Structures are given as structure tokens and as C-alpha cells.
Amino acid sequence: MNADMLRTAADKKVVLITGAARRIGARTAEVFHSHGYRVLIHCNRSLTDAQALAARFNQQRANSAFLLQADLNSAHDIQALADAVLSQHARLDVLVNNASSFYATPLARVTEGQWVDLMGSNAHAPLMLCKALSGRLRDSQGSIVNLTDMNINHGMAGFSVYTMAKAALQAMTRSLARELAPDIRVNAVSPGAILWPEHASDAVLHAEQQATILAGIPMARLGTTDDIAQTVFFLAHHAHYVTGQTWRVDGGRGL
Ligand SMILES: NC(=O)c1ccc[n+]([C@@H]2O[C@H](COP(=O)([O-])OP(=O)(O)OC[C@H]3O[C@@H](n4cnc5c(N)ncnc54)[C@H](OP(=O)(O)O)[C@@H]3O)[C@@H](O)[C@H]2O)c1
């Protein structure tokens, strides 16, 4: 890169999105990228999808996407991820804590390992990433957006650990909004039903369960990945006087 290209690259805003290889995370990456951001795509197991996404972005705009692989249940990997962001990128404007594990933990069968895993990706890793990256976010007067879940307000039978982890993330959103103000805004997006859990998941829903959920949504449809991504982008990029808020995007399901 010549000096002009380096200057241009340094001028670009940078977003780190965890769990960005697929589904809501990938659409969020597309939205930020389409607004000129350089996108740091974090993935764990979905390396092939993440590589394809980064290649597509870099074809559209050279040096506009970078890959970072880390298991967010590993303290070592979290630190390595943060170190890579800090050493390879001169600025960071937005952190989107999107990665999440999600599966049922019926009370009679819940295990210590499930607790560690679900709390790890949904609450512990976001906290540690905020800690490690807050200095860089402060430099850019940046913002953090956390992905929670509207089910934490209503409870979800069989999913106590997941909902507890997301509730912790929502509590973190409010506390860090106070602690990091006025330099860094911290908000959350709380999706309703957007994409059904995938085939391999034990959270997969039968047709009648899906129909029951749909019947309870005033907007009478699932949300789209774009519904979530656009709200994340709005909170991060436009909502300069909004902090500590959790914005439900659920088609009215929680009314
Ligand atoms: N889908 C919905 O309808 C819905 C509803 C309510 C809330 N949400 C929330 O919205 C966000 C995005 O939803 P989604 O359905 O798109 O998410 P998802 O597909 O279930 O998960 C997103 C990514 O999280 C990553 N992940 C999970 N455990 C990880 C770990 N230990 N280390 C690193 N990465 C890990 C995975 O990355 P790899 O594939 O690379 O391993 C996965 O692709 C999540 O926070 C979710 O809880 C979604």
C-alpha cells in the first residue's frame, strides 16, 4: 500500500462483529461494510463461511475485511482476539457482541459445562472484549452493541441458563453505559423470532411450535436478519445521544 492508500485505510471506521460468519452476524457485517466500514469478521467454527464473506468484501473494496478466529469460551483465545485487533488495526469504532451459543438446558439435566459454555459466549466473552477494547473505543468515541433476546423478559421454559446469560448481558449493557460514558455508548438489540434454530440444534422447533410463535407476533411474520442488522447499525452509527438502552426488534411480540 502506498501512503495515500494507508491514509485512506486509516480514515475508515472499523467494526468488530463476533460470530459474523453467518446469519444475523453476517448481515450485520454487510450493512456496516455497505456504509464504508472496515469489517473485522470474527468466527469460531464457520471459517469457510467467514472466508467467503471476507473475500466478497475485499473484492468490492480492497483491505476492507479481515478474519479473526477465536473460541470465545477460551480466555486465551479472547485475549488473542483482542490483541490481534489492537496490533493490526489503528482504530476501532464499534464492537458488536453477537456471538452466542443457544440450546435447551432443562432443569433436571442442566450441567456445569452447559453453564460455563452458555455464560461464556453470551456474557463473559462480551465483558472481557469490552474490557480489552475499551481504550481503543474511547479513542474513537465509539460504541458497543450487544445482542440479547426478548425472551429474557418473559422467561423461556427449558432455557433457563441461556436466558440468564442474556439477562446478564442486558445488565452489563446498562452498567457499562454508565461506566464508559461519556466516551463510549453501550446499547443492546433484543431480537424476537428472526431465524429458527438450525437443524443440528436441540432447540429446533416443530411446525406446530413455530405456528404458535408466529400466531403471537402482531406483525404476523418472522423478523429478518436485515431488521436486526439495520437496528444495530442505527444504534452504533446514528444514535449519538442514546446509551444504556435495549431496543426490542420483535414485531410486537413482547407487547
Ligand atoms: N436467530 C434469532 O431468531 C434470535 C432471536 C433472539 C436473539 N438472537 C440473538 O441474536 C444474535 C445472532 O443470532 P443468530 O441466530 O444469527 O446466532 P447463531 O447463528 O446462533 O450464532 C452466531 C455465532 O455465534 C458463534 N459462537 C457460538 N459460540 C461461540 C464460541 N464459543 N466462540 C465463538 N463463537 C461462538 C458461532 O460462530 P461459528 O459458527 O463461527 O462457530 C455462530 O455462528 C445472537 O446473540 C442470538 O442470541 C437471535
Image (tube, rainbow, N blue to C red):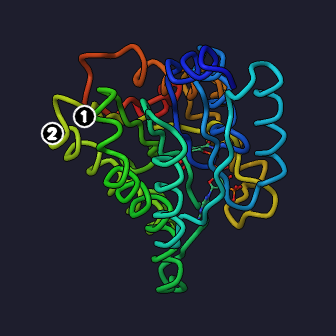
Compute the Cα span from label 1 to label 2.
7 Å
Along the viewing direction, whichever of 130 and 13 lies nearer the viewer: 13
Label located before the other in sequence (1 or 2): 2
Residue at 35%, 39% in the rendered image: 136
The secondary structure type at the circle numbered 2 is helix
CB-based contact (under 8 Å), mark 1 and mark 2: yes
Q: Which mark is residue 178?
A: 2
Does label 2 point to a residue whose CB lies under 8 Å from ligand 1? Answer: no
Task: Identify whether 76 is placed above or below 14.
Answer: below
Q: Amino acid at mark 2?
A: Arg
Instruction: Residue type at mark 1: give it.
Output: Gly
Left of 150 or right of it: where is 139? left
Which of the numbered marks, if any, corresponds to residue 97? Answer: none
* Residue 241, placed above or below residue 147: above
Residue 222 falls in image quadrant: top right
Q: Which residue is mark 1?
A: 244
Asked whether, in this view, residue 131 is left or right of residue 236, the answer is left
Residue at the spot x=51%, y=82% of the render?
A: 110
Identify which residue is drawn at 49% across, 23% down: 13
Per the image, label 1 sits on a secondary structure element best described as loop
Q: Categorize mark 2 by other alpha carbons within 10 Å: few (<14), some (14-19), many (20+).
A: some
Callout count: 2
Question: Residue 80 location in percent, x, y?
Answer: 52, 63
| Position in image of residue 53 (x %, y %) | 78, 36
Of labels 1 and 2, the one closer to you: 2
Q: What percent of the width, then of the height, locates residue 8? A: 57, 16
Considering the image in quadrants, where does the C terminus appear? top left
- List x then y, in percent, for residue 24: 64, 37
Residue nearer the viewer, 51 or 83: 83
Q: In percent of the image, x 23 and y 45: which residue is there?
A: 176
Q: Give above or below for 163 relative to 185.
A: below
Give 238 or 118, whichever is nearer the viewer: 238
